[in-house]
Image: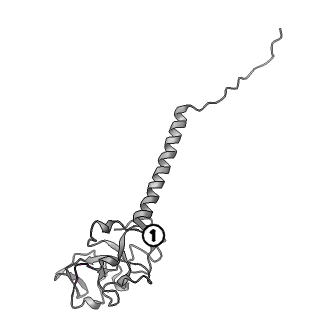
Amino acid sequence: MSRKQGLSFYHKKKRISGTVVREIAEWIFLVFTAVLIATVLVFSIGMRTSVIGVSMEPGLYNGQEILINHFLYSIVSPKRGDVIVFLPNGNQNTHYYVKRVVGLPGETVQIKDEKLYIDGVLAEEDEAYDKMAEAGIAENGITLGSDEYFVLGDNRNNSEDSRSGNIGPVKRDNITGKAWFHMASSGSGMGFIK
């Protein structure tokens, strides 16, 4: 009988256990489900548009993309401080406007001495907003209807908003939704809109 000289290596076939395969499959399923849910949410209750102009600086910049929640305002009304997206006077042939709600239905909005007054009381606002050089149509006060909102841009002296006669108060039916998330731009990173 002859024996093989030298070392002999035994090549063991590698087997993947059923547990590892199951864990990998679960992770793939979870990632796929998360992506699917996110896609459905964005396309069913949201939409994407771009900010046009500098009226919402420094929070939102010209050309910055934002996500809009269509669904929210079908169950609740816009609140003071919400950043909304709307078509002025329902005009389908214009771009979407992005502005902040400052006056609610039934309130009287007036701009005097470069400041905002709601029902005759000085509005508490962020000190970052500029004093308003132009009062526009709100100089003598505007009482909003039951479905109207008064909106201003955050960059108060560079904004075409409810002070302008060709925009005026925004009717509820012309509001597309609430701007809730902004994409990264040269001026800022991604994040929720305040």
| Residue named by callout 1 | 48
When the figure is inspected, residue 137 is found, relative to residue 150, above or below; the finding is: below
* Quadrant of the frame with the C terminus: bottom left
For the point 45% across and 69% down, the residue is 48
Q: Amino acid at mark 1?
A: Arg
Q: Is residue 191 left or right of residue 1?
A: left
Looking at the rendering, which quadrant does residue 188 occupy?
Answer: bottom left
- Locate residue 144, reporting x and y percent: 23, 82
Residue toward you, 3 or 170: 170
Instruction: Report the residue that reaches farthest toward the top.
Output: 1
Q: Tell me if I can see residue 54 in this picture.
A: yes
For the point 35% across and 84% down, the residue is 89
Q: Is residue 168 left or right of residue 191?
A: left
Residue range in magenta is: 143-147
When the figure is inspected, residue 99 is found, relative to residue 34, above or below; the finding is: below
Residue 98 shown in magenta: no
- Locate residue 5, reporting x and y percent: 81, 16
Q: Secondary structure at mark 1?
A: strand
When the figure is inspected, residue 63 is found, relative to residue 132, above or below; the finding is: above
Most common secondary structure along the magenta stretch: loop
- Locate residue 42, reporting x and y percent: 43, 62
Looking at the rendering, which quadrant does residue 8 occupy?
Answer: top right
- Locate residue 22, reporting x and y percent: 52, 37
Q: Is residue 16 left or right of residue 158?
A: right
